[in-house]
Amino acid sequence: MAESAPHLFDDDTAPAAPDGAAFRASDPDTRLYTGDCREVLGSLPEAGTVDLVFADPPFNWDVNYGAWDDSMPRQAYEQFTKEWLDACIDVLSPSGSLWVNIPDDTAAEIVVHLKSRGLTMVNWCIWHFRFGQCRHSGFITSKVHALYFCKDPENRIWNPDTILEQSDRASIYGDARTMAKDTNKGMRVPMDVWYGKYWGRIQGNNKERRHNHQNQIPEVYLERVILSCSNEDSLVLDPFTGSGTTCTVARSLGRRSIGIEYSPENAASAWERIHDIGMVRKGEGIGQSSAIFKSRGGKTT
């Protein structure tokens, strides 16, 4: 397990963290642990009470994550995947949801394993981005899978009205019927392929960019997941904190959160974002149109 970082708090009166959190802040309670998530998850006092888990694990693509081995033999990687998934299931509340962000080569294995553990798939979403890595050996990869599972589909937190987007009927066709609805005029729950403004890969001079962090997810992605699958003061957990997007967005939205990061150096950088910088695109992805055609300006009946 990685060496723990020193405890840091948001004020001088904050109590010591007897549970071993490397970083902790209050209002709302936010904690960041360092170490192997399988071990940390097994020791959390909140087992069975986490409302939402969002996991963006290492893809085993030989990326430099410092001390972490991102080039395991395939069998070892699949075993690692099952172990952290099981640990996440154990901390979920009966009404909790689990999201996994994963590429093509491991999506099917995760779906099969979660179903074998009795979880229900709510959606198999796709995060689509325009700047995949150029190659000639096959079609350019321009997506990652966003797998949405829950323990009890009839008793899960689900807030669709918080994440509505403009419908094509409203934004393209000016359809009077959608504007005549009693509620949510011209709006709809987003489709299961996610793209649009602020939904691209975080790179270059993007103001969300955290240098020295790999494969950063845009804030609008986590905002959609957290708003729809948790309530204010719900407990959100990320077993692979990385640049800190999940806890940053959760904290900005009034959710309690727990992050786990293998690297103490990455954890310290993520904490700066979570605690000192905060969310930079709050609300900017809500209510957008994802239409791929311009408005035709007319109305249909």
Image: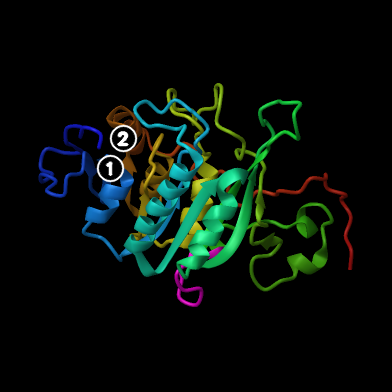
Say above or below: 272 vs 127. Answer: above
Instruction: Name the one closer to the observer, 127 or 176.
Output: 127
The overriding secondary structure of the stretch rendered in magenta is loop
| Label 2 close to label 1 by CB (< 8 Å) | yes
Q: Tell me residue 85's x, y (percent).
A: 41, 55
The secondary structure type at the circle numbered 2 is helix
Of labels 2 and 1, earlier in sequence is: 1
Task: Give the CA distance from mark 2 to mark 1.
Answer: 8 Å
Residue at (10%, 44%) from the top-left corner?
Answer: 16
- Tell me the amino acid under the disc marked 2: Trp
User: How many other residues sit within 10 Å of disc 2, few (<14), some (14-19) or many (≥20)?
Assistant: many
- Tell me the amino acid under the disc marked 1: Leu
Is residue 244 toward the left or the right of residue 15 in the image?
right
Q: Examine the structure image and report whether residue 157 is included in the region drawn in magenta.
A: yes
Could you tell me which quadrant the C terminus lies in?
bottom right
Say above or below: 194 vs 1. Answer: below
Q: Examine the structure image and report whether residue 211 is included in the region drawn in magenta.
A: no
Instruction: Name the one closer to the observer, 146 or 288.
Output: 146
Residue at (32%, 46%) from the top-left corner?
Answer: 37
Could you tell me which quadrant the N terminus lies in?
top left
Q: Tell me residue 188's x, y (percent).
A: 67, 62
Residue 271 disc label? 2
Is residue 23 toward the left or the right of residue 132 in the image?
left
Instruction: Name the one closer to the observer, 101 or 104.
Output: 104
Q: Quadrant of residue 241?
A: top left
Residue at (37%, 45%) from the top-left corner?
Answer: 247
Q: In the rendered structure, which segment of residues is drawn in magenta?
A: 150-160
Q: Residue furthest bottom?
A: 154
Which residue matches tag 1? 32
Residue 120 appearing in the image: yes
Q: Tell me residue 32's x, y (percent).
A: 28, 42
User: How many other residues sit within 10 Å of disc 1, few (<14), some (14-19) or many (≥20)?
Assistant: many
